[in-house]
Amino acid sequence: MRRRNTLWGLVFTAPAIIGVLWFTGYPVVASLYYSFTSYTMVSPPKWLGLANYVDLLTDQVWWSSLWNTLYILLWSVPLGIAVALGLALLLNLKVRGSGVYRTVFYLPTIVPAVASAVLWTYIFDPQYGLLNDALARVGITGPGWLADPGWAKPALIVMSAWGVGNLMVIMLAGLQDVPATLQEQASTDGAGLLSRFRHVTLPYLSPHLLFALVTGLIGGFQFFTPVFVATGGTGNPAGSTLVSGLYLYQNAFQYFKVGYASAIAWVLFAIVAAITVATFRLVGRRVYYGGR
């Protein structure tokens, strides 16, 4: 009976297993092999050994794209967590119509990434954009945003905080798990609002904050769609928005240097893995799991 159940289980899950192996497993293994070769998709791969990885060490464009990625990540991740936590705190208040507010704050998350990027491109337009128009009404001359090398990355950082709805829901769930009795006891003992938030709410939120931090770091290195749509895949102005994901795309599908692009992908994977492990080691030990 156990063998029969196992057999039928494999039969019904075979399409999913085949799909994962074919569309995920094979590309991963193939990209690792291609990273050691010179491959252009129109000719057979030629073995190069570690040449692609060595070339990355002296590729100034690669280092510039990595710096742009880190810059956006170091600002967008804390900003996204702060915005999500702030919205969750507001939605956790007992007010009339809270369901409507939750829906409104969550709506940007379900907007397609391309449509959202196009929308923000119009908002950041230096001449006709809504943001500069609003600034002009109060006597402020707005910057060039995506057309200015000094303001392009801040504009992308603001765009990244637009879709924090999923994270907001997670934070809201964490807030509702904080025992009300502890809040009442702390208030009875004379703890103020900020003190209760620091010593009662934050410890119970720490697993959710760790999740937000780790997923934000991983997602930050995969930042691609907004900058691709906003700049047309160029990384302009003056390369200020050329992030690592976009540089990988350019090498693979514009320059047809698939082997080099695969090496970039695996270097990014190694960086993300190292940062994730370091985050768990440095921050994970400070997480409070309800008494453990």
Image: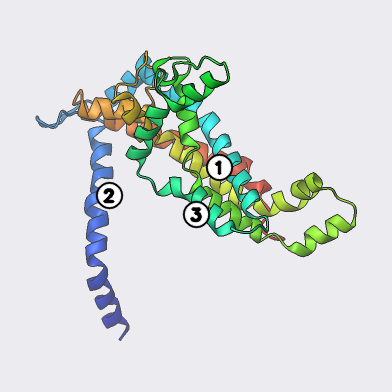
Amino acid type of the residue tagged 2 in the rendering: Thr
In this rendering, does residue 37 appear at all? Answer: no
The residue where tag 1 is placed is: 213
Q: From the top left corner, tell me how far across and down residue 233 is, in percent.
A: 29, 25
Instruction: Say what amino acid the circle numbered 3 marks.
Output: Thr
Per the model, the C-alpha gap separating discs 2 and 1 is 25 Å
Q: Residues within 10 Å of mark 3 (few under 14, many from 20)?
A: few
Percent position of residue 18, x then y: 22, 59
Q: Is residue 231 left or right of residue 23?
A: right
Q: Residue furthest bottom?
A: 1
Residue 103: mark: 3
In this view, 51 is above or below 97: above
Residue 14 sits in quarter: bottom left
Secondary structure beneath label 1: helix
Q: Residue at x 27, y 49 (%)?
A: 24
Q: Secondary structure at mark 2?
A: helix
Query: Distance from label 3 to label 1 (Cα)?
Result: 24 Å
Q: Which residue is mark 2?
A: 24
Q: Position of residue 22 (x, y in %)?
A: 21, 52
